[in-house]
């Protein structure tokens, strides 16, 4: 079934049907909901606004710790720039062989498309990333001007790295020269012109997010801010994470516990 992009904000590629499925329920998250990543938000928005204005923009790699807002940044962008013509097409890394055909169907349309691949990484021996390379920088045909690629990953270089990869590295006249295997692995991430890194929060940053989530007032049942912080720290310890995702999960659980007591 063809997509009416005048009324559709996003679509997901379904390989068994070899077609895009329109997304009916869009996550309503906004940029203001993403806490503790102001620098990443600013650079991400600046690059997208160049893209939407018809100016050259960089493909985007969002890499780093889990739960820090990488995927949410893309969802927020869709909501924020929808009226300016931004559309999102999500594709799984296992289906990247279909990407050239998807892009062919988009290149003549008036909307601006962000191709979104979440949790992108490749293990040793996987070759699906080669299909992505041609879209990022083109082959004989230049990449379409109305398509930009955004990937999230826990790996900066996207492809798993082995200790043996270092065997081909040489120092020539004081300069580091990578071996063929390393060069191949770096060549994919190098095609993303904008790298935005997401690091684990310190305890201070985590508690600042907690304070923002409870900004209007201390949740009913909490005697003071210190009690709230102690509960939040205990929750983070059980998750081994101080991410924004963890903070939001704590807020839901904490409010539920208070509601059960009243």
Image: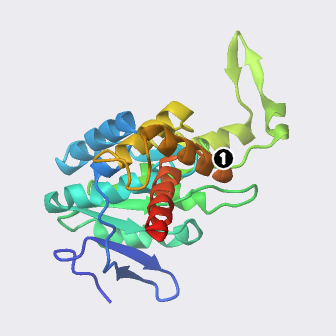
Q: Residue 81 versus residue 28: which sits nearer the camera?
A: 28
Quadrant for the N terminus, please: bottom left
Q: Report which quarter residue 149 is drawn in.
A: bottom left
Residue 226 appears at what percent x and percent y? 49, 37
Total marks shown come to 1
Q: Is residue 99 above or below residue 124?
A: below
Tell me the colour scheme of the image: rainbow
Mark 1 Cα-neighbour bin, 10 Å: few <14, some 14–19, many ≥20 = few
Label 1 secondary element: helix
Q: Is residue 10 above or below residue 172?
A: below
Which residue occupies 54% across, 72% down? 95
Which residue occupies 75% across, 17% down? 171
Which residue occupies 66% across, 44% down? 185
Q: Is residue 77 left or right of residue 239?
A: left
Residue 115 appears at what percent x and percent y? 39, 61
Q: Is residue 128 above or below residue 158?
A: below
Q: Tell me if I can see residue 110 in this picture.
A: yes
**Residue at the extreme top:** 173
Q: Is residue 147 left or right of residue 164?
A: left
Q: Tell me if I can see residue 139 in this picture.
A: no
Quadrant for the C terminus, please: bottom left
Residue bearing mark 1: 237
Q: Residue 234 versus residue 83: which sits nearer the camera?
A: 234
Q: Report which quarter residue 199 is drawn in.
A: top right
Residue 87 appears at what percent x and percent y? 27, 64
Q: Report which quarter residue 90 is drawn in.
A: bottom left
Q: Is residue 199 left or right of residue 37?
A: right
Residue 9 appears at what percent x and percent y? 25, 70
């Amino acid at each position: 079934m063809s997509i009416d992009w005048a009324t559709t904000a996003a679509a997901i590629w379904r390989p068994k049907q070899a077609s895009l499925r329109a997304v009916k329920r869009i996550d309503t998250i906004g940029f203001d909901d993403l806490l503790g990543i102001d620098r990443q938000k600013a650079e991400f928005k600046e690059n997208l606004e160049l893209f939407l204005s018809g100016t050259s923009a960089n493909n985007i790699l969002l890499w780093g710790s889990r739960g820090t807002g990488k995927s949410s940044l893309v969802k927020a962008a869709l909501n924020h720039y929808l009226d300016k013509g931004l559309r999102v097409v999500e594709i799984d890394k296992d289906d990247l062989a279909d990407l050239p055909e998807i892009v062919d169907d988009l290149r003549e349309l008036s909307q601006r498309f962000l191709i979104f691949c979440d949790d992108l990484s490749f293990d040793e021996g996987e070759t699906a990333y080669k299909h992505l390379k041609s879209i990022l920088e083109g082959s004989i045909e230049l990449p379409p001007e109305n398509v930009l690629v955004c990937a999230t990953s826990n790996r900066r270089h996207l492809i798993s790295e082995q200790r043996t990869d270092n065997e081909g590295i040489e120092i020539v006249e004081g300069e580091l020269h990578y071996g063929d295997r390393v060069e191949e692995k770096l060549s994919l991430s190098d095609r993303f012109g904008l790298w935005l890194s997401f690091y684990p929060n310190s305890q201070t940053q985590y508690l600042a997010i907690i304070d923002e989530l409870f900004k209007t007032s201390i949740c009913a049942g909490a005697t003071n801010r210190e009690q709230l912080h102690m509960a939040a720290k205990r929750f983070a310890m059980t998750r081994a994470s101080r991410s924004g995702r963890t903070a939001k999960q704590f807020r839901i659980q904490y409010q539920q516990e208070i509601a059960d007591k009243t």
